Image (cartoon, coloured by chain):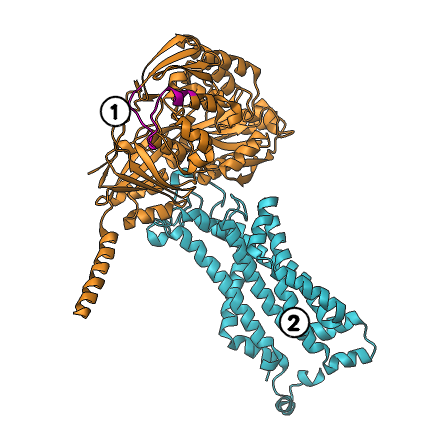
Chain colours: A orange, B cyan
Amino acid sequence: MKRSWLTSGLASVALIAAAGASWAEKANDTLRVAFTKELENVDSYFNSSREGVVLQRAVWDGLIYRDPVTNEYKGNLATSWEWIDDTTLELKLREGVTFHNGEPFNADDVVFTVNFVAKEESGVKTQRNVNWMKSAEKVDDYTVRILLKEKFPAAIEFLSGPVSMYPNEYYAEAGPSKMGLEPVGTGPYKVVSVTPGQHFVLEKNENYHDSPKGQPTITNIDIRTIPDVNTQMAELFSGSLDLIWQVPADQAEKLDEMGQFTVENESTMRVGYLSMDAAGRSGDTPFSDLKVRQAVNHAINRKELVDALLKGESQVVWTPCFPSQFGCIEEAATTYEYDPEKAKALLAEAGYPDGFTTEFYAYRNREYAEAIMSYLNAVGIEADFKFLQYSALRDLNMKGEVPLAFLTWGSYSINDASAMVSQFFKHGSLDDARDDQVLADLNVADSSTDPEVRIENYAKAIDRITSQAYWAPMFSYNTNYVFTKEVSYSPTPDEVLRFTTMTWN
Amino acid sequence: MALTESTDPLLQEITGPTPGQMLRKRVFGHQGLLFGGIVLGILLLVAIFAPLLAPHDPYAQSLMTRMEPPVFLGGTWEHPLGTDHLGRDYLSRLIYGARVSLMIGVIAALISGVIGTAMGVAAGYFGGRVDMVVTFLINVRLAMPVVLVALAVVAILGGSLQVVIVVLGLLLWDRFAVVMRASTLQVRGREYVAAARAIGASTPRVILSEIMPNIANNLIVVVTLEMAHAILLEAALSFLGLGVQPPTPSWGLMVSEGKNMMLFEPWLVLIPGAVLFLLVLAINLMGDGLRDVTAPDNRS
């Protein structure tokens, strides 16, 4: 008797263990996802990475929402909005929304959030996302006004993107560090647990309001940081991951050939470019010479990079912004055909007949950086290659110590040229061009509410930037999403994983 | 001398085979030494004549012909070992990579050999305070994890061939010092050293012509061990992205670059890995063999 109890006990333990390993997590209603990069802080105002954007869209809501397919603006936490004058936006808020901790959402939360993030001392990581707002004021419990510093036509776009609403009582007490560990928002998913940089567990918000994001269907989302793509793929094979994304083109191709997984490719707004220290911030550098910058532009075979390395939906980009963005006028950009001989000739004219050696920085896609380096090498620009973490390179860049770098920018998926070109060319700490004419054009373009005026001035800025070859814009990125056949998901071109639109097959 | 040159059969019988003949016999009878020597010799020749042997420019990129498989996996003879992720000829990069590995191995072992041997012999021969200082330095050095220190230094100074060589050279002397000190302690009390001193030989002369030849066999073993060690460390540093910087071909870097495609194109990792293994094995076998054939106790 005793023995049979023991054996049956052991058998059931073994059975449970075996079942746990073999059951797809569909049975547990848990979608397991991998992040490649470590997310520094879940608080969406205090990180600047793609993983942060993904969590931001899941945990919090903005006042407005842009449908990623139709690009139509819809009310999210606000139900309607209206410009009182050029710098005052009045919004009616949705009633009956509660935060994950039970705190009701009302005008106080909006006023608190806007006033907090708009203050420069609060230290929001990407100032551009918030520094167009001056403050907010409460009209009544469900009506607020957001006051702008000056005219800012992209306001609606920013309000539907990076500006998410925080609970005033909780945030006042918790601050960014606790918000990063125990995030509280109104979004479709609640955060169950956070192991900083490593593991994030989300759970469906059963009381999610009637949002244009749609209602979540999958109950649990389990996100782990796995830096190595091979490990991610191995876990996908063994069934301990259901979805991986940002899969490099070569691997995605092979995974597609295997036929066991769904591989989806979507373009993203991310643009890869070479930034050159035209202003000479890093000391005496050859890049302050226009001819050298033109030579660099002519040395790169963008088409080959796109066809052979990036593949998918990527395209050659000549503009310092993503062509779908409002104001990103492709016709205004000077194009530089691939011509190594011309590049050599330009270098010789600039006084470098034998080329020169320069430091060359990069932080992602080492193989693209190597390919670019090889093109530069071919015309005589020898690169002293430095591969750094993003934050380290950004710091160096802010100090102006980077003569040449392969950088990328995803514009936070904001479909407006100001999110990229104005981010880098308005004499900020990341501006290596420091061109007054560009600054003047961008100031007009950024603050006008007349679309014609904006387009005209962005075009002027783009023309100046590209004819002066401050950058060598090269290509846009694409993202490969690979998931098991049990998951159904249609990625959108803005590189945001939307858990609400994922379902089990 | 006259005796050994004599062809008189009687004399030959009395004296037996000459030391040279005996050495030759031991060398050719030692399989490990032979194998190691031949492989190392071939790799040395490959490194020296790299520009003549490489079928392509190891830096020539061709993005349209990326990751072509090697001949034995269905590739073409245009690229016998295939091409890497940037379409560069894998064989050519492997051949040029031999230069990097051997150069680092030889020079780093040389630098650390000079430092370590000088310290070890001094400590063993003079004893007393010199010994205390050297032992202290050895302890300090042994307390530092080589890979971590190398990583830190390279991270600060930036990775390049020169930096890696110097850093490894300055880090790997501990075994030389330990072994040379112990060996010197053993021989310094011997009669021939006392005899040399008695006839008034100067200290440098005693060290160079009495002590060194008698501890050389140990030195050879350590040299080979450290050479292999340095080569592996370079590969490790390059694999981590802190050693030799691209586009310089280095076997460690090739493994690292092939790593991303490891699940689908394992040969990208296997080929440089196998060559690295072969080189280190050859050096170690040769070191072992050299000790066997030169050690005084094995001469009988």
Q: Give how far across and how far down residue A337 sits, in percent.
A: 46, 25
Q: Give how far across and how far down residue A128 sits, in percent.
A: 47, 23
The amino acid beneath tag 2 is Ala
Q: What is the chain letter for disc 2?
A: B
> Residue at label 1?
A210
State the residue in front, A185 or A489: A185
At x 75%, y 71%, the residue is: B128
- Label annotation for residue A178: none
Q: Is residue A102 magenta?
A: yes
- Label annotation for residue B216: 2
Label 2 or label 1, whichever lies nearer to me, is 1
Question: Can residue A192 be seen in the rendering of this structure?
Answer: yes
The amino acid beneath tag 1 is Asp
Q: Which quarter of the figure is the C terminus of chain B placed in?
A: bottom right
**The image quarter in which residue A74 lies:** top left
Magenta span: helix, strand or loop, mainly?
Answer: loop
Disc 1, SS: loop
State the residue in front, A453 or A151: A151
Q: Which quarter of the figure is the N terminus of chain B placed in?
A: bottom right
At x 31%, y 37%, the residue is: A481
Region rendered in magenta: A94-111
Q: What is the chain letter for disc 1?
A: A
